[in-house]
Amino acid sequence: MTFNEMAREFAEVFDELDTDQINEMLAMNVPFETLNFFAEYASEFAEGMELPEDLRGRLPNLMLMGYLLRTLEERLHPEFEE
């Protein structure tokens, strides 16, 4: 499975999850400190940039999606870990 195929499958599955399922998945796969880091980093990153407010609010979620995809990739293909 290529990374693009995996990302598409991930997006389809993620789209079907309800809020409780998403929260459960996050609790099982993402340390609380990592969630806080994404929120803080995205806020600092967006400072001074002219970004629409809705995009600013989505930056932590976009970072989280990348983190989850990388975690999934490492679990499916441990030989790709650095």
Image (tube, helix red, strand yellow):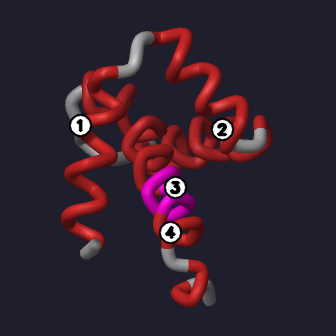
Mark 4 and mark 1 lie on one chain; the one further toward the N terminus is 1
Q: Tell me the quarter of the picture where residue 50 sits.
A: top left
Which residue is pictured at 77% across the width and 36% down the height?
32
Between label 2 and label 1, give the one nearer the viewer.
Answer: 1
Report if the CB atoms under discs 1 and 3 are less than 8 Å apart: no
User: Which residue is identified by label 1?
Assistant: 12
User: Rounded to the nearest whole Å, what is the CA distance between mark 2 and mark 4?
Assistant: 23 Å
Name the disc covering residue 67, or none. 3
Name the disc covering residue 21, or none. none
Q: Main secondary structure of the magenta part?
A: helix
The magenta span reads 67-72
User: Which residue is identified by label 2?
Assistant: 35
Residue 46's x, y, as percent?
41, 44
Badge 1: few (under 14), some or many (20 or more) residues near its Cα, within 10 Å? few
User: Which residue is identified by label 4?
Assistant: 76
Mark 3 and mark 4 lie on one chain; the one further toward the N terminus is 3
Q: Is residue 4 rendered magenta in the image?
A: no
Badge 3: few (under 14), some or many (20 or more) residues near its Cα, within 10 Å? some
Which residue is pictured at 58% across the width and 36% down the height?
39
